[in-house]
Amino acid sequence: MSFLHRSKEILGMNARNLLYIERYNSKANKRFADDKLFTKQYLESRGIGVARVYAVIKNMRMLRAFDPAALPKSFVVKPNRGYGGEGIIVIVEHQSKLYTDAAGTVYNWEELFLHIISILEGKYAISGLRDTALIEERLETASYLLPYVTRGLPDFRVIVFKQIPVLAMLRLPTIESHGKANLHLGAIGIGIHIATGKTTYAVSQGKFVTRLSGGISVREIEIQDWDAVLLTAARTAQVSHIGYLAADIAPTKTGLKVLELNARPGLSVQIANQVPLRKRLEQITDVKALTAEQGVAACKVLFGEGRHETPDELMAKEVIGPYEKILVLGEPEQEWRAKIDLTATHNSIRSALMQDLPEPLVTVKLRGKRLVLPVGTETVPNEEPYDIIIAGKFLSDFLVDPALTKEDMGDTRSVDSAQRNERIIRNIDRKIRSIHHRFNTIAALKPLNLGVAKKEFLRHPIASPVFEYRPISDVDELERELRALPSVPDHPLSQLYHQKIFEFFSILGLMKAIDTPELQRRSEEIYGGVSETLYQAARAAILESMVREDSSQPLSTGQIVKGLTDFLHAHELQHWKIDVRKNAAADIAVSKNKTIVLKEGVSFTEHRLQGVIAHEIMTHIYRLENGRRQPYAIFALGTAQYLATEEGLAIYNQKKLGISMGTRELLPMLHCVAIYLAQRLSFSDVFSELMSTYHVDNTMAWNICVRAKRGLANTVQPIAFTRDSVYYAGYRLVKEYLDKEKDAGLKQLYVGKIGVGDIAVISELELKAPKWLPT
């Protein structure tokens, strides 16, 4: 079947936008990729080669002050947020005040001056808004590609999905493209077999071509160090955290250089390769590569030489599933259970079995075919339901069908599978509990200089504060421990554990993203974000609220302690203690060790104390205590979906009191508004907006802004930390659910620290009924 007739497998623009860009690339990803200067600096700081920047011109004042005499013999002028190669002038030489570009056009400085003005005015920017002009190093083509290039700099465009290279092409600039490697300008796109680096097909100006000028076949091009190109592309995806991207990489005389990243990659790469992109992306939707090296290994296994086999050859191959029964040859012969892992780079076996091997090789029969498998020092944990992991690269004579189930493995102990899976899930549960107590995300995100920064800012609230953070430790160790967890088995709760483990990795990613453009995307991955719809709902709720002044009696710290203690004792929670601390981070907080922490000297009104009891005790402590009564620790730790429900339920319980609490009633909505604004504005601008539009006092405005900008050092950046969106978003979620399910729904939410979305998973389990429920 020809490529053009495989329409269902070709990725179209709408499918690309909806299935991949919207799902895997956040707004922060797109801003990161669009900002070429920041991208360049970010990649360079992480050891990835980029072109050197000679000058950054941000405005007319800087342009007028710029001395063109300081420019080197050759250089490139380009827009920072350009798109499709527009606005780029490549100067190959200049003499006196005349500058010659790659196409032979001669400019004087006045003409370049006017071109830079066009860049500043946003003529070439993807957004159409004002932009910055960059003057940077002109890269020279690697010598092995010079025979194929008429003029300009060729590059490799590599599509990377989830750190796995998927498709690639070599883009050769032409006279028609004015020396630029953009296909829509007339460059030639030459498909590259992604796993081997061999050139395949070519396209130019909408037509397939087989030869370059000079009669050279497109299949004769020799690409050097292709593995290095793949690794560079995968590394850009790893460090940038962009899920679906195109990396443009130039082979130059001084090595590989990343020209730019594109979070909205075009679709012509599949035409140049005559390979449908959608099918390949679907193949790796469930494949996880934790490092760039694993991504390249997965690419070679999934899209390797086997892709060149004929249909008859492929049909002749034995089809196996992800789990198989194998016969181990020797004296005596043994029957082992095998897991097939296409992304693994080596084979692993159970440590107890390793001791019986005479050499680091094992000879087996799989579906009647004999295999000799090398095994290293990596072992399969004892709790896993298989004895060996076989890497896909050793199974070239087989095709793997992921749809086959574990029952096809022929496990002779299948009668005990439910009991074995229960033991494994409880082991994972214990390990998750151990790992959970070592996560302290909020502490990592709390600025060290918060008190000093507050004093300075409130004196001069025009300049946004600069925050300092403690170095992050234990992240790599925690990642290793998470990777060492057993595979989650078939179990009624498997979904909850899969999601919890993924959440742990996301939290570690968030910690690594402190003070980077990735902060917002990482926080949205865990907590969700503030959409236009949520923002408008929050604004409307603020405007419609009839805020009543809290005129109830003020209470001293001692009276607060007594009120809390009396409530705890009256509800069989006397094992909880009240701890008054001088340096407490908040007025009141529930700790993990059955303690309510109060800040020394704190004063509440009677109404606020009632609200605190509804929020902290009747929500957080009740759900925690009910969760501790369940047979699995995850119900006390909190599932991956629990936080929005937890905080939304706390707000719901407060509102049910029907008492006045002053402007504090607006806090959930104000947090949403601040987060929405913080994605676009600086700290000081958000602060000003809260005070002028929403009439918030300066202390409350400061606290809200800190929470929306924590995790950033330079709070001028239009980036938000989105955690506090859970209060209002969660309240809307809980209210909608309880309006429908009434008391029965409330009892379900109080079996432990779960989310509304978890109820469908746990509905068939025999869990203990909640002992503590709000009255």
Image: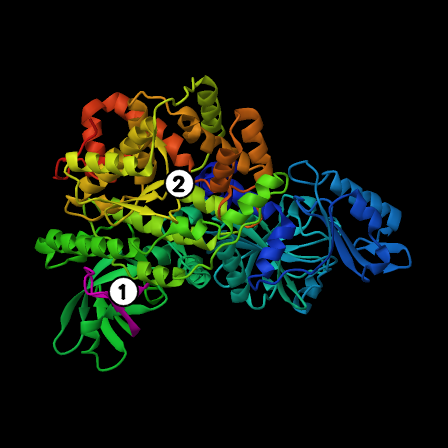
Residue linked to disc 1: 389
Alpha carbon distance from label 1 to label 2: 35 Å
Q: Circle 2 — which element? A: helix
The quarter holding residue 414 reads bottom left
The earlier-in-sequence mark between 1 and 2 is 1
Residue 263 visible in the displayed image: no
Residue linked to disc 2: 527
Q: Residue at x 68, y 50 (%)?
A: 187
Q: Position of residue 513 (x, y in %)?
A: 48, 52
Which region shows up in magenta?
A: 375-391
Q: Position of residue 265 (x, y in %)?
A: 56, 45
Q: Is residue 411 above or below residue 16?
A: below
Looking at the image, which residue sits at the far left?
415
Residue 721 visible in the displayed image: yes
* Residue situated in front as seen by the camera: 625 or 237: 625
Within-10-Å neighbours for mark 1: few <14, some 14–19, many 20+: many
Please give left or right for residue 344 compared with residue 104 in the image. Answer: left
Looking at the image, which residue sits at the far right?
96
Q: Is residue 92 magenta?
A: no
